[in-house]
Image (tube, rainbow, N blue to C red):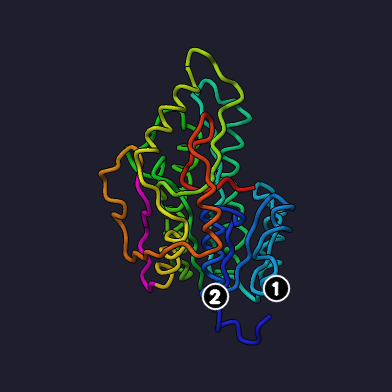
Amino acid sequence: MSSSNDNYKVWYITGVTGGAGKALASRLLEIGGYKVAGTSRNKEKINSFDLKSNKDFLGLQVNLIDEHNVKKSIEKTIKEFGKIDVIVNNAGQSIFGSVEEITDKEQRLLMDVLYFGPCNVIRSVLPHFRERKSGLIFNISSVFGGDKNSDIPFFSGYCAGKSAIYSMTECLREEVKPFNIKVCSVILGYLKTSFNNPLTTNQIKEYNLKEKSNDLAKVFDNCTPELPINFANFIIENSKLSNIPSTLQFGKNPYLPNKPSYPHEKVRVNQDPPKQFDKEISDIPQLTDGNIHMPYILHE
């Protein structure tokens, strides 16, 4: 632990082993002056993560829907780095299917990951933030659900979860203002990651789900995705603002390709992907049945 913890910022990022989370953690450590705690529910991915050897990175195996587990990870981060300055609720998951098809278990899983998990993180860190009279929370929502009039068929669970976290964030922002805690919704569009969007296990033939999946893939094919490294720079630069916007948008909605990508943008940073991302990006498979690239990586 540093003797003066005012000389660096500590970020706690969920879903850190791929996509946007990995890009953000890597970029913070590349810049320097930051320490990063990153979570994944997959122990093997944390153990083999290429940032693990960095002294400023703390890998944490965390089940976000286990409140006790989340609280322990927050405590461990504070013990290791002395504090937490920024929370990024990035972890996500999606299931493709109609409301009738998606099972009760699948719907509850989506809400656990997309809404209740972030609530556990926020609930666990707020005593620390209130004591310090400082803190910043980025809740990652989506152009699907978090953006008005952008809900799409066969993504009801995902849209509902992202709508829920967006609405919660609006309430949270006002609640914690007296403690000098800042809260921002990030409406994330189409990002080039290997996010896997599985089909529901309860397919009903009358809905022709695979055909709908192929139709959606064509929509995504006609939209140019943003690179994760540009998302990382965008978040980092906005985190430095003294008056952070209540809502930021990054990336396009594939269903509204002519809509401006950054209606709430304050800072826009473009950068070529660093070398460590070259292979990851070039190896991303083409869109196929049941493998639709969504805004960000599945937390695992």
| Residue in view at x 48 percent, y 69 percent | 179
Read off the residue under disc 1: 80
Q: Note whether 106 is above or below 272 in the view shown.
A: above
Disc marking residue 9: 2
| Residue in view at x 54 percent, y 72 percent | 30
> Magenta span covers which residues?
241-253
Residue 42: give x, y in percent of width and height: 70, 50
Quarter of the image for residue 7 reads bottom right
Q: Secondary structure at mark 1?
A: helix
Label 2 neighbourhood size at 10 Å, few (<14), some (14-19), many (20+)? some
Amino acid type, callout 2:
Lys
Is residue 273 shown in magenta?
no
Residue 14: give x, y in percent of width and height: 59, 56
Quarter of the image for residue 60 reads bottom right
Q: Is residue 277 left or right of residue 64?
A: left
Residue 254: give x, y in percent of width and height: 35, 40
| Residue in view at x 70 percent, y 69 percent | 53
- Characterize the magenta stretch by its predominant secondary structure: loop
Is residue 245 shown in magenta?
yes
Amino acid type, callout 1:
Glu
Camera-nearest residue between 94 and 257: 257
